[in-house]
Amino acid sequence: MSKASKKLADFFGARRRICTLLSSQLLRSNGKERRMKLAVTMPLSNKDMTDIPTQFLNQFSVMEKVDSATNRSTIDVEFDSMGVRIFSTDVTVEPTVSIQGALLHKFAMVAEGSGDKREVSLDFLIYLPATPALREWEWETIHAEFFLEAVKAQGSLDLSGEADDEDNEEESVSGNPLDTAHGRAGAVVVIPPPAKSGPKQSAKFHAAQGQPEQHQHIEPPATTGRRKPGTSVN
C-alpha cells in the first residue's frame, strides 16, 4: 500500500451504501494467513451524498459535470482498521457478513457516458480476513449488488508483501488478468465449486464456467466367470 496515503476514519458516516462486487481473490500472507481481496464499485451519481468524505466530494464535483474531460482520477486515501458489514438489502436488519480489521484503499473516481447520461462511480479495494461466511457470500454475489457499511474498529491487517505483490496469491476467483486494476472490463470469472457436492452443485459450477458437465466413464473389470476348483486361468 502507498506510504503517502492519507488515513481517514469516517467512511460515508457509516451509512449503508449500494455497491457491486466486481471480482474477488483469495490471498495468503507471508504468515500463511488467508485474506480476501474484493474489488468493489459504488455508484455516486443521483445518490445521497450526505457524509461523503471531502476528498471524494471535491473530485466528484468536477467529474459529474456534463462537459468534464476527466474520466478517471485516483484518490490517495485509505481507511484502515475498519469494521465491515455487508447486507443483502438497504432495510435488512442483520448483516450477511460482519468482519473486523478491514482495509479500504486504492480509490479511483470513474466517469462513464456523456452529457445527461454521464455517471460517476467510486472504485476501490477491500482487504479483509477470509472466513467461511465471506467465501460463501462472494460465491453468491460476484457481479451482483449488495449494501456496505464501514465503521472505524479495532484491529488491522498486516498486508506486508501482499497488497502490492500479488505473487502471494494462493487462489483467485478471477481466472484471467483484468483489463483494469478493479476488473471493470473484460473480466473472466472462474468460480470455484461449492463446498457441498452433488448433481445440482456440479451443474451450477459447470454452467458458471460456460462448459458442459462431463462425466468420466469407467469400464468395469473383465470377468472370466466362475471356475471350478483345481483349474487355472491362462
Image (spheres, rainbow, N blue to C red):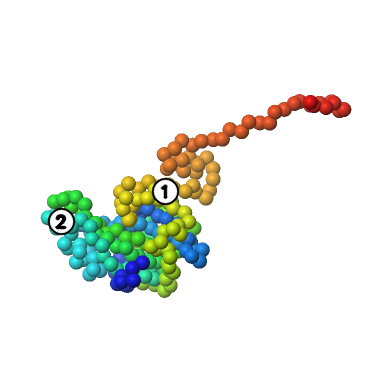
Secondary structure type for disc 2: loop
Task: Give the CA separation, mark 1 to mark 2.
Answer: 33 Å
- The image quarter in which residue 8 lies: bottom left
- Three-letter amino acid code at the position of disc 2: Ala
- Depth check: 127 or 139 in front? 127
- Three-letter amino acid code at the position of disc 1: Gly
The quadrant of the image that shows the N terminus is: bottom left
Q: Position of residue 41 (x, y in %)?
A: 30, 56
Looking at the image, the residue that sits furthest to the right is 230
Residue drawn 76% across the image and 25% down it: 225
Residue drawn 52% across the image and 50% down it: 195
Classify residue 149 as left or right of residue 211: left
Q: Position of residue 45 (x, y in %)?
A: 21, 57
- Depth check: 22 or 165 in front? 165
**Mark 1: few/some/many CA within 10 Å (<14, 14-19, 20+):** some
Residues at badges 1 and 2 in contact (C-beta under 8 Å)? no
- The image quarter in which residue 25 lies: bottom left
- The image quarter in which residue 96 lies: bottom left
Q: Which of the labelled discs sits on residue 69, or is there none?
A: 2
Looking at the image, the residue that sits furthest to the bottom is 154
Looking at the image, the residue that sits furthest to the left is 67
- Residue on which disc 1 sits: 175
The quadrant of the image that shows the C terminus is: top right
Q: Is residue 210 above or below residue 132?
A: above
Classify residue 100 as left or right of residue 228: left
Q: Which of the labelled discs sits on residue 128, or is there none?
A: none
Secondary structure type for disc 1: loop
- Depth check: 70 or 234 in front? 234
